[in-house]
Image (cartoon, rainbow, N blue to C red):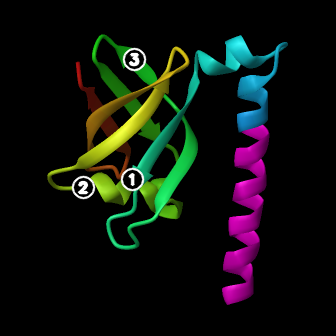
Amino acid sequence: MRTNGRLVERAVGGVNRRVLALRSSRRWGAAVRRHLTIVTYTGRRSGRTFTIPVGYRRTGDEVEIGVRIPGRKNWWRNFTGEGGPISVELDGTDRTGHAIAHQDAKGAVTVTVRLEP
């Protein structure tokens, strides 16, 4: 089973690298950046810094990230309870904020980021 976990991690890493490449491409970058951003956060247990692409919606100083298949992803758990600090790339600059994850009764997870001024 451990081997399958590593294989999945490698596959996810490959997909993430391709998404990041699309975001920076001249041809597709602008369209991709309208819907995908990059978040950077520190793992609550490991203390490691992680950078991942995510889909988002922005309204003013608030960014909403819908977590697809939350049972198979762990990153959003860093923002349960009181939440925690996060960095979000918007319009070519990194913006810091405070993220809080919410899981509804059906299991859907949304991470809401309140951007700092």
Q: Secondary structure at mark 2?
A: loop
Find disc 1 in the rendering and name its residue. Answer: 76
Q: Quadrant of the C terminus?
A: top left
- Badge 3 or badge 1: first in the primary sequence: 3
Location of residue 48 (image quadrant): bottom left
Find disc 3 in the rendering and name its residue. Answer: 58
Q: Which residues are magenta?
A: 1-19
Tell me which secondary structure the magenta stretch mostly adopts: helix
Residue 90 or 111: which is nearer the viewer? 90
* 50 lies above or below 99: below
**Outermost residue, right side:** 27
Labels in figure, total: 3
Cα distance between the residues tagged 3 and 1 = 18 Å
Pointers 1 and 2 in contact (C-beta within 8 Å):
yes
Residue at 24 percent of width and 25 percent of height: 116
Looking at the rendered structure, the kind of residue marked 2 is Thr
Label 2 crowding class (10 Å Cα cut-off): few <14, some 14-19, many 20+?
some
Describe residue 110's horizontal placement relative to residue 37 as left or right: left
Q: Residue 69, how many percent across, how many down? A: 52, 52
Q: Is residue 102 magenta?
A: no
Find disc 2 in the rendering and name its residue. Answer: 80
Q: Residue 29, how many percent across, how many down? A: 74, 18
Location of residue 86 (image quadrant): top left
- Badge 3 or badge 2: first in the primary sequence: 3
Pointers 3 and 1 in contact (C-beta within 8 Å):
no
Q: Is residue 15 magenta?
A: yes
Cα distance between the residues tagged 1 and 2 = 7 Å
Q: Residue 14, how many percent across, how many down? A: 78, 53
